[in-house]
């Protein structure tokens, strides 16, 4: 895991009550063309994981720092803050990568607020390298998507062909009041299973720190080993 320069963003979190029994919105599986021939060396990349198969070919996962802190009001009048992250996956293996991700509506309960949850959503937009320096990484006009998806699970199915790469956004919402902390997130791989880690460091705001991994999906490729 590789860290670049430190970027700090403080958030205020109190989360809404569980919205059980909601339906999810599925999107058709996407086939994507290569967005870039290289690996980003941007200062916006927080962590990088490199996995190698028996032939020495690699699968690389890059996770960004947060951007945003934008306010959003849902159709019921609840006011949230949201932050935007992106994950880039570079497939340097000889086989297509089938990516499946799903975040249940109640995937992450706030430890200090039983029955209240983070809202983790995947917009349909594709992130590209030229958007790294833009506000919210170029993700705009989110209100219609959030209005429809805030109380539903969120999923992504995507094919990344051999020697190509693709990126996707993750938006995390919270009610505007609550605990303070510095948030970091990241996708990683264990076997064929995908995990999304959310860390909130409360040390600088005298609040409780939390660290949780969410099992959120899978890939089709096998026998990939993390390179230290």
Image (cartoon, rainbow, N blue to C red):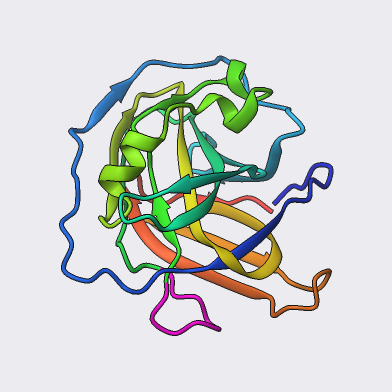
Residue at left offset 25%, top offset 55%: 152
Residue at left offset 38%, top offset 16%: 33
Q: Nearer the viewer, residue 127 or 61?
A: 127
Is 114 displayed left or right of 4 in the figure? left
Residue at left offset 45%, top offset 64%: 118
* Residue 70 percent location from the top left of the image: 58, 43
The stretch of residues the image draws in magenta is: 108-116
Residue 109 magenta-highlighted: yes
Residue 98 visible in the current orientation: no
Residue at left offset 80%, top offset 42%: 4
- Looking at the picture, does residue 225 appear above or below residue 59? below
- Looking at the picture, does residue 22 appear above or below residue 205? above
* Residue 17 percent location from the top left of the image: 36, 74
* Residue 154 percent location from the top left of the image: 30, 50
Q: Quadrant of residue 181?
A: bottom right
* Residue 171 percent location from the top left of the image: 47, 46
Residue 79 visible in the current orientation: yes
Residue 158 magenta-highlighted: no
């Amino acid at each position: 895991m590789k860290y670049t320069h430190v970027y700090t963003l403080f958030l205020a979190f109190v989360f809404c009550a569980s919205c059980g029994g909601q339906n999810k919105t599925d999107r058709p599986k996407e086939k994507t063309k290569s967005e870039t021939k290289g690996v980003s060396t941007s200062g916006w990349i927080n962590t990088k994981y490199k996995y190698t198969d028996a032939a020495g070919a690699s699968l690389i996962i890059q996770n960004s720092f947060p951007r945003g802190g934008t306010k959003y009001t849902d159709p019921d009048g609840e006011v949230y803050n949201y932050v935007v992250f992106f994950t880039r996956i570079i497939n340097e293996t000889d086989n297509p990568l089938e990516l499946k991700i799903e975040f249940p509506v109640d995937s992450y309960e706030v430890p200090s607020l039983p029955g209240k949850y983070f809202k983790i959503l995947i917009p349909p937009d594709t992130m590209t390298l030229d958007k790294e320096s833009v506000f919210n990484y170029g993700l705009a006009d989110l209100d219609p998507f959030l209005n429809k998806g805030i109380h539903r699970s969120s999923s992504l199915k995507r094919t990344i062909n051999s020697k190509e790469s693709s990126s996707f956004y993750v938006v995390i919402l919270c009610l505007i009041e609550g605990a303070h902390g510095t948030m970091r997130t990241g996708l990683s791989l264990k076997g064929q299973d995908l995990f999304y880690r959310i860390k909130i460091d409360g040390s600088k705001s005298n609040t409780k720190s939390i660290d949780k991994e969410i099992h959120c999906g899978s890939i089709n490729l096998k026998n990939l080993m993390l390179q230290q």
